[in-house]
Image (cartoon, coloured by chain):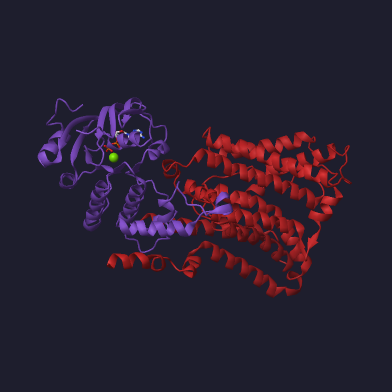
Chain colours: A red, B purple
Amino acid sequence: MTEKTTMSSLPDEHRTSFLKRVAGANTLWIGLVLLVLVATFGAIRPDAVFQVTTLQFLLAETAVLLVLSVGMTFVIITSGIDLSVGSVLVFASVASAMAMNAVSGGDATNAGWGVIAFGLLVAVVSGAVWGLLNGLLISRAKIPALIVTLGSFGAAQGAALLLNNGSNVSGIPDRLNRTFGSGTYLGIPNIVIVAAVVTALGALLLSTTRFGRYTYAVGSNEEAARRVGISVRGHLTKVYLLAGTLAGLAGFMGNAFFRVAVVTGHETDNLNAIAAVVLGGTSIFGGTGSVLGTVFGVFIPAVLEKGLVIIGVKEFWQPIAVAIVLVAAVWLDQTRRRARNQR
Amino acid sequence: MSQPLLEARDLTKNYGTVEALRGASFTAHPGEVVSLIGDNGAGKSTLVKCLSGVEQPTGGTLLFDGEPLVLGSPNDARDLGIETVFQDLAVAPDLDPAANMFLGREILKPGLLGFLGVLDKKAMRKQATEHFTRFGATLQSIDVPIAALSGGQRQSVAVARSVAWASKLVFMDEPTAALGVVQRERVLDVIKRVRDEGVAVVLISHNMPEVLSVSDRVEVLRLGRRVARFKASETSVEELVGAMTGALTQEDAA
Ligand SMILES: Nc1ncnc2c1ncn2[C@@H]1O[C@H](COP(=O)(O)OP(=O)(O)O)[C@@H](O)[C@H]1O
Ligand SMILES: [Mg+2]
């Protein structure tokens, strides 16, 4: 009889309260840091900070990095790393722009939606191919992710330069730029809406599906995942494929925003994405993390950069400030793990 | 005697130059508790890994219900109703006990959401809670990461997980090693209950009184080979220790 009672009352009693769990999560703290930053800059220069164009520009610029960082979140949770995302972005961006030009007789400036859809397909597929290559080399050939993606970091950048002899590619359809590059909906840049949708889907995939659960399991204890029959190799391949595909999409978004496929300026995208993910509370050792945290992690450096400029501090302070927060975040994570593993 | 459920004949397993198994044989009958004992390094864990599909033996044969069997992966063993509590537990420390129990066997939501791979976390948590209560894994909280539990609790979770899914055979590689007296008794109780449900249990333990109290039979491994077999009711701690150390050998054991 007593056993029955315990059993039925277990689910409520034994569940940590929602508030407690949220407060214990890194995500909450990193979100607070972001809020404090925005409030501080806002208090100093409310006129400049809360201006629609300032916010719009901040969001639009960050949208591309956000999409890269969503893919990076999955990769880092598996305790992997992907250094190639920025180069893959450039490759996809160049390949997509050239493909759109090619099917429009050399200049796609006035092209229609059919050509634009083709350009999107080329961007996403070329990103996916690099991601698949990364995934297969890491999971089948057992080469460390750091080395594989360091290789594709160089190779994808080189291949992008080869495609157009090292020049930027112009001829991005006006229609693409007007709608997704500079267009807004209710004041929100459309490119931001795209990034937000991708991010929301990524968050759902990670937190509610079996794919997400396996991502955590593989990063938490690869051998345990294998022993319960999860195809670890297959899953790792899919995760790198996802990161590559999102990098391809990010390349297409960049084309829409900048109206040109640029071959430079993405050399540190990989590090920025990794920093965003780790800032957001995802453990560099794998097994824990969240997409929401990554969203905060993407915006902290962006807000710091914009805010410091606005309040008249030399923007050179920005990387230093980010570095301090980043190291502190990893240090906290490590302390927590050490405390936990001593039990 | 009945037809053996699982039989290993002359298994060998080499790790590079290390011969972990040198012609080991092993037999488990349906619904019995058989203890596998031996000194450290005798090859017990390696044998368990070979019999649960985690490692592939270098040589030798396996029979399941008298039929030749090849275990290419842990899934092959699981499909036959064989579960294992590994010595290193093999749990995902960042996932909670319910997620660990259902790892690789997730319950999905019905309908379209399930088709999209959406987990039914509520159902899994409910079933896991009931199961842990039934098999004596006392946890203050069902939704903290396994890493936040004590070593004993982690071991109880691993035991509960294995018996949840086993329909034919459970291997338990030192399941009581990190346990206190009360928890140890509970695991032994779980073993008896599983046996009563007709599931065979292979127990690895260094605790001889424990082995004698819970087992029907005992098989002894020494230097990668089976060196003796006993009925638990007809042997003694002295005899078992003798077989483990090599002071005593049986002709027909191998
Ligand atoms: N993965 C491995 N690589 C190399 N040697 C191993 C490995 N696993 C086990 N061994 C060796 O095989 C022998 C048997 O080990 P094990 O099966 O763990 O013994 P037991 O569980 O009986 O203590 C030991 O000498 C051990 O060092
Ligand atoms: Mg062992």
Residue at 15% over, 34% down: B243
Image-based side of A188 in relation to A204, left or right: right
Of the 4 image quadrants, the one containing the C terminus of chain B is top left
Count of marks placed on residues: 0
* Residue at the (68%, 75%) spot, across then down: A43
Which of A319 and A121 lies nearest the eye of the viewer? A121
Q: Is residue A190 left or right of residue B133?
A: right
The one of A91 and B243 positioned closer to us in this rendering: B243
Can residue A324 be seen here? The reply is: no
State left or right for residue A142 relative to residue A113: left
User: From the viewer's perspective, is residue A31 above or below residue B6?
Assistant: below
- The picture quadrant where one finds residue B19 is top left
Comparing A273 with A68, the one in front is A68
Relative image position of residue A200 (x, y in whole percent) = 63, 57
Please tell me which residue is depicted at 39% across the width and 40% down the height of the picture.
B78
Image location of residue B108, percent across then percent down: 51, 52
Residue A282: x, y in percent? 54, 55
Picture coordinates of residue B1, whole percent (x, y): 19, 33
Is residue B81 in view from this perspective? yes
Instruction: Determine the image quadrant of residue B143.
Output: bottom left
Ligand 2 occupies quarter: top left
